[in-house]
């Protein structure tokens, strides 16, 4: 049986002087450059074979920059970039990005919008329909207040190939479950929607989290989505606020150690390969 490659389905690169990272708080420890040369040894140490870079800036120019990295580094298997989904000219932007075989999908920093229903109220639905036409994916960067709007999006764009990032960022530090659980359960009931087991330690008590703080949330999403619709991600370098790259990988493996070998292979690589069309062996 062929070994299924391990894929980190979610991480970022940035250069602080290159783009506008105003979402970072003033004086944030994240406000330093992170690139492929920083990540390559960490990936190797953690037993990860390939990665997917995800946008951190609302700029198609950032997507082009990330695609250059994918062309240059063998371990980068795909890029999820940003386009203006409300722009009537978005097909032309996507034409340019899709010149690269590494361009796999789009993400919008939805959690940062003042209107929690931005995706259904902004005209972005037309852009999402364009993604469907092109067989591109969409990452929902949602927090609990955004979750009730995802079923509305899927009603209007039922063929959208979508994934919820970071298990929708429940308030792990407060050990809060509702209304996150009830709202995410409705999302999980929609056929085909995936969920990334990522971003959790940044939502926990960053200095004092334990694996037992994360475990209930992972078991909830496992129960809701099943192992066929979950994918492992590190959210590096955001995760460095609370732990190292290898710590994230090891913690996720420990929580999911009771899965069958086939289900583990799916969560830790096979599902991301299939969802994003990474074409890995």
Image (cartoon, grey):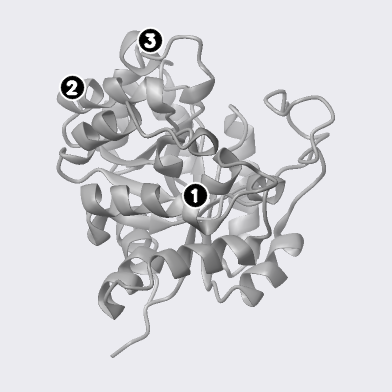
Left/right placement of residue 192 relative to residue 128 reads: left
Q: Residue, x 23% and y 34% (percent of image)?
A: 187
Q: Residue at x 55, y 37 (%)?
A: 173
Secondary structure at badge 2 equals helix
For disc 3, the marked residue is 122
Q: Can residue 103 be seen here?
A: yes
Judging by the rendered image, the residue that carries numbered circle 1 is 213
Give the mark, 1 or 2, whose residue is nearer the N terminus: 2
Q: Label 1 vs label 2: CA separation?
A: 36 Å
**Mark before the other along the chain sequence, 2 or 3:** 3
* Quadrant showing the C terminus: bottom left
> Residue 247: x, y in percent?
62, 64
| Front: mark 1 or 3 | 1
As drawn, the residue found furthest toward the bottom would be 1
Picture layout, residue 21 above or below residue 80: above
Q: Report the disc number at residue 156.
A: 2
How many residues crowd mark 1 within 10 Å: few (<14), some (14–19), many (20+)? Answer: some
Verify CB contact (< 8 Å) between mark 1 and mark 3.
Answer: no
| Up/down of 134 relative to 3, above or below | above
> Counting other residues with Cα less than 10 Å from the Cα at mark 2, is it few (<14), some (14-19), or many (20 or more)?
some
Give the x, y percent position of residue 199: 53, 46
Q: Is residue 175 left or right of residue 239?
A: left
């Amino acid at each position: 049986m062929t070994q299924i490659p391990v894929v980190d389905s979610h991480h970022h690169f940035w250069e602080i002087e290159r783009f506008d990272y105003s979402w970072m708080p003033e004086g944030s420890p994240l406000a330093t450059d992170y690139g492929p040369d920083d990540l390559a040894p960490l990936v190797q140490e953690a037993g990860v074979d390939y990665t997917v870079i995800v946008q951190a800036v609302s700029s198609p120019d950032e997507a082009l920059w990330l695609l250059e990295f994918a062309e240059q580094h063998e371990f980068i298997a795909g890029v999820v970039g940003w386009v203006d989904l409300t722009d009537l000219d978005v097909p032309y932007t996507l034409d340019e990005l899709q010149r690269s075989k590494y361009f796999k999908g789009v993400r919008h920093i939805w959690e940062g919008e003042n209107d929690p229903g931005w995706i259904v109220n902004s005209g972005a639905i037309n852009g999402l329909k364009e993604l469907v036409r092109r067989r591109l994916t969409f990452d929902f960067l949602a927090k609990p207040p955004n979750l009730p709007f995802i079923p509305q999006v899927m009603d209007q764009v039922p063929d959208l190939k979508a994934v919820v990032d970071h298990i929708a960022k429940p308030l792990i530090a407060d050990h809060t479950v509702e209304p996150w659980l009830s709202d995410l359960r409705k999302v999980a009931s929609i056929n085909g929607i995936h969920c990334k087991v990522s971003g959790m330690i940044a939502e926990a008590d960053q200095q004092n989290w334990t694996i037992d703080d994360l475990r209930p949330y992972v078991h909830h999403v496992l129960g809701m989505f099943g192992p066929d619709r979950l994918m492992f991600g590190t959210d590096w370098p955001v995760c460095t606020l609370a732990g190292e790259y290898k710590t994230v990988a090891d913690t996720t493996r420990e929580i999911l150690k009771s899965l069958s070998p086939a289900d583990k292979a799916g969560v830790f690589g096979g599902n991301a390969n299939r969802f994003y069309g990474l074409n890995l062996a």
